[in-house]
Structure formats: structure tokens, C-alpha cells
Amino acid sequence: MQIVEVDGRDPVVFEKFFAVRDQVRRTEQEFPVGLAMPEARGLFTADSPDERSNGLGLVDGDTWLGMVWLDWWLSENTHALDVEIAVDPRFRRQGVASRLLEEVIKRAHADGRTLLTGSVIAKAATGASSGTAFAEARGFVQKHTELHQVIELPLDESVIVGLERAVPGYELVQWTDLTPDAWLAEFADAYTTMSRDVPHGDRSVEVQVWTPERLAAREAWRVEQGRFTQTTVAVDADGRLAAYTQMSGNRAAPERLFQNDTFVRREHRGRGLGIAVKIPNLKALQASLEQPAVVHTWNAPENAPMIAVNAKLGFRASDHRVAFERELS
């Protein structure tokens, strides 16, 4: 068996690497989630100031036994290395994951990283899985859990219309893909505030600081990767952005959509702005769909207001995403 480096430059190698991860997710999830292969490879080959992604495979001849996806943060959280290990079900309990983890630790030490982070999929009913058992056995500590909810589109138009509601004193503004220049500063500030306010559990997470330039560059990169984004914001009487929501997908896999952030500034909470922006956003996105799709979203259990909003829309529980950390000595 040998370790294979994966950087995305060789399309054949990347396809085999990606196939292991994709197979595992399809085996473990009723509604598999993850980036489409072209977008995933784009992450590996991109020259991003914020993060670098690469991977390793454990290979026996022509057979890929397992893989590990690595995200190296370059702006915030530069002490951490994010890890996702996947093992072909045929080769589990044969030391594949442990061998990959050993290689990851070597590389983390060499780069000066002091913390391994990662998330594993767990059953909705129990919050446990083979992934959580492996993490705990290898010294990882559970830090946070998020409920993964899904909804299948298209929804009946009457359901959407029945949930629409205007909030007095606020105007809704929508756009697709790139944030208009006039809103970049407001939106960057909202992104930073959301990064600070969103529940993180006990994770060792640094706040992401967004500037208009950083936001514009990230959005342009997303478009280059084939991603589309639908945004709706609520603007108060003073012209300030009070709330926003975003949904996205990739043209390479339009049947798989993501409910990204939904955020309401503290001083505007308790007025129904969460659902006031989500419904028109969903309506606009659904109008652009050419085929059925599944929307995925994740929320911490303590974020009860947002889970309640999703329940009104018809989202249902699929599984849990459990975050772990392991300090390196």
C-alpha cells in the first residue's frame, strides 16, 4: 500500500480520489451532500488567499482504499488543519483510516499546525456513527453538533405564498450571484457579524473578518467555479442591511442546493425577518429551476428560531454533522 498525494492537477487521480468520498456519502446519507466533482477539483487547483485544499489517498495497486481531504486555512484559524477521512466500506476495520490519520499528523506538524478539526456524519436518531466512534477512539473531542435538514423542490406555490409576509419598516432587495457595489460594504460587515454571532459550540474558531474586497473576490471565484447564488436582504428605514439569506448551487449538479447563511442583526431580531427574507429567496430560486432539487441546510440545536423557520417551510431532519477537534502535542 502507498500514500498518493492529490492536488487536483491530474484529473484521473482526482476522479478516483473523489469517487471514494462520493461513494461513502451515498452509502451513509439518504440525501448525499457535497460539492460536485468539477467544483471540488476547482478548490484544489485554485490560488486562494483564504485557504488551500489538497488530499491523500491510500492505494493498493489500482485500488483506492481510502482518502483524506485537507483544508489548510491561510487567513484565520491558521493553527488548524481541517480533515475529512473516508474509507471504502469494503476496506473498513483494516487500519486504513488510522494510516491516513498518521500521515495527516506528520504533515500538520511539518506546517506548524497545532489543531486538527473535522466533521463526521451521524444518524439523526442517535447522533452516533462509525465516524464518531473512530474520532473518539483516536483522541478527538466532540465540540459541536448541527442538525442537517432537507426539503425537496419544487414546493407547491400555495405553500410558499401562504408563508410570505411583509415586515413593516423594511424593504426587500434581491440579487443573483455578485453583490452590487452599493451593498458590498454593508454585506461584508454583515458577514463578519454573522461569523461572530453564529453558534460555534466549543470549537476553537476565529471570527472571519470580511472586507468588501475579500467578499468581491470570493464571489467572483464562486462564479468562475460554476456556482450560482440567490440573495435576499431586508433593508431598514435608514437604508441599512438588517437581515440577509442566501441559497446556492452549482451548475454541474443543479439538483443539489444549499441554504447558506440566514442572519438577522441583533437589534432587528424578534420581528420575523428570518422567514421574511427566506420565503422570497426560495421563491426566486425555485422559479429558476429546470428540474427537481433537494435543498440542504445545517443549524445548531441551540439555534431554535432558525430550525423553527425551516420547519414552517417543510424541512425535515436527515442526519447530524458532528464537529471534533484534537490538539497536537
Image (spheres, helix red, strand yellow):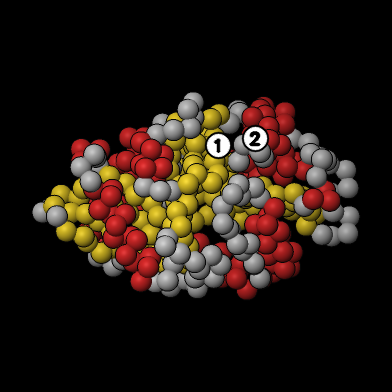
Q: Kindly indicate whether the residue at mark 1 contacts the one at mark 2 (C-beta within 8 angstroms).
A: yes
**Residue 128 as seen in the image, left or right of residue 194:** left
Does residue 79 appear in this view? yes
**Residue 193 as seen in the image, left or right of residue 87:** right
Q: Is residue 254 above or below residue 179?
A: above
Does residue 43 appear in this view? no
Q: Earlier in the sequence, mark 2 or mark 1?
A: 1
Position of the N terminus, as image quadrant, is bottom left
Q: Is residue 317 above or below residue 261?
A: above
The residue that label 2 is drawn on is: 307
Q: Amino acid at mark 2?
A: Ile
| Label drawn at residue 166 | none
Q: Tell me what residue is drawn at x 89 percent, y 55 percent.
A: 237
Q: Quadrant of residue 93?
A: top left
Figure disc tally: 2
Q: Amino acid at mark 1?
A: Leu
Q: CA distance from mark 2 to mark 1?
A: 9 Å
Residue that extends furthest to the left in the rendered view of this protein: 61
Q: Tell me what residue is drawn at x 77 percent, y 43 percent.
A: 273
Q: Tell me what residue is drawn at x 55 percent, y 29 percent.
A: 316
Q: Is residue 89 above or below residue 114?
A: above
Residue 192 or residue 187, whichever sits in front: 192
Q: Neighbour class for label 1 at 10 Å: few (<14), some, many (≥20)?
A: many
* Element class at badge 2: helix
Q: Position of residue 225 (x, y in %)?
A: 44, 61
Position of the C terminus, as image quadrant, is bottom left
Q: Neighbour class for label 2 at 10 Å: few (<14), some, many (≥20)?
A: many
* Element class at badge 1: strand
